[in-house]
Image (cartoon, rainbow, N blue to C red):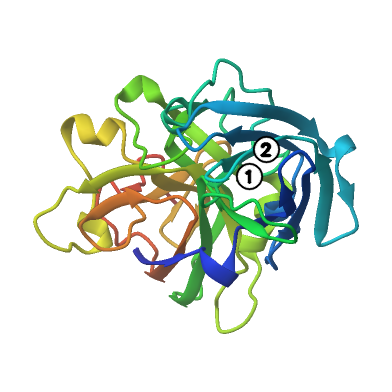
Amino acid sequence: MIAAVSAVSLGGCSGGYDLQEYDAVPGEGLEMVMVTKASASGEENVIDNLNVFVFSADGFLERFIYMTSRNLENDGDTVRTWIPCIFGSGSRIAVCANFGYRLSGINTLDELAGYRLHLAYPDEFSRGLPSSGISASLVCEKDRKVIVPLERMTAKIPVRIDRSLLDNDVKIRIVSARAGNAPRSATVFGESAARYAGDVFEKGYAISGAGIDCLNRDTGLGTSGTADLYVLENLQGNLLEEDAPEKEKYPEGIDAEVCTYIELKAEYSSPDYHTPAGKYIFYRFYPGASGRSFDIRRNTVYDCTVSLSGDGLDGNLPLLDSSSLEER
């Protein structure tokens, strides 16, 4: 089993949102226009709720507003709302989208920067991906536009299966895909990492049932469709001295408790072996920008293709768990 992994940023025109405030004039307030960028998945652009902060030039909170989609005028690609506020030159606007609740106890920009978003459960992204952004210093001039680029706090991990080199008499059916050791929390701004075993969901975001059928359909040349997994940022760094092939890329010790991995659960059948009813084999790999990196960076895509060849059992533990196989 070889898992080819690449990473590309979602910044700029390839992802995220732009939040624009118009008519930044003292005492008149802000007309906020949020423009969602094109995305392969419409769910990635859902805006369900907003925490909006206006900070003074010296970083103290001047205005806070929480709103849900009911307060937003949505005409497709653009979401608008009006925020009444008074601010001076040098003020900054910070936005937290899709947190799902009203943030409280934030009085300064530094406090917001250090705040951690906590997930109640690992797939808590149905209301939209949590995102955050902060403007440059505002200039109070009429018709002045201020743009706050929102950055997704999650990474996207598209997974597909390449069966083009698999023996014809071997059948491997993917039953589920999940992210293991998915962080329970992440800082709003700056870099974020799971700090100990209790800071991750051992069994994180998962796809099964009809949602995983795409990994069992051939879309051409033996390659399946794509299943998208999402996890909060988890920067664990370069843990290996040099790039390693996927079957040798795995952490040890305490790192194994916090590094995010992808696990595929599958039914197996070949002329020699099979998985009995209710039993499965498991493929595991660790995404990252290189063969030594275990970083899962926010607003980034880690594109993973799992290439199965021969009998599909040529991986080495711990990346392949075939202990449930029985001989025919």
From the top left corner, tell me how far across and down residue 38 is, in percent: 70, 68
Q: Using the numbered discs, state the Cα–Cα distance from disc 2 to disc 1 in whole angstroms.
A: 6 Å
What residue would you read off at disc 2? 98
Q: Residue 89 sits in which quadrant?
A: top right
Q: Residue 103 sits in which quadrant?
A: top right
Q: Earlier in the sequence, mark 2 or mark 1?
A: 2
Given the current orientation, which residue lies at the most extreme top position? 105
For the residues bearing labels 2 and 1, Cβ distance under 8 angstroms: yes
The mark found on residue 129 in the picture is 1
Left of 292 or right of it: where is 328? right
Number of labels in the image equals 2
Mark 1 secondary-structure assignment: loop
Q: Which quarter shows the N terminus?
A: bottom left
Given the current orientation, which residue lies at the most extreme left position? 241
Q: Which residue is drawn at 62% across and 57% down?
A: 147
Task: Report crowding for label 1: few under 14, some 14 to 19, many 20 or more residues within 10 A (C-alpha).
Answer: many
Amino acid type for the residue under numbered disc 2: Asn
Q: Which residue is drawn at 71% across and 35% down?
A: 86
Left of 287 or right of it: where is 148? right
Mark 2 secondary-structure assignment: loop
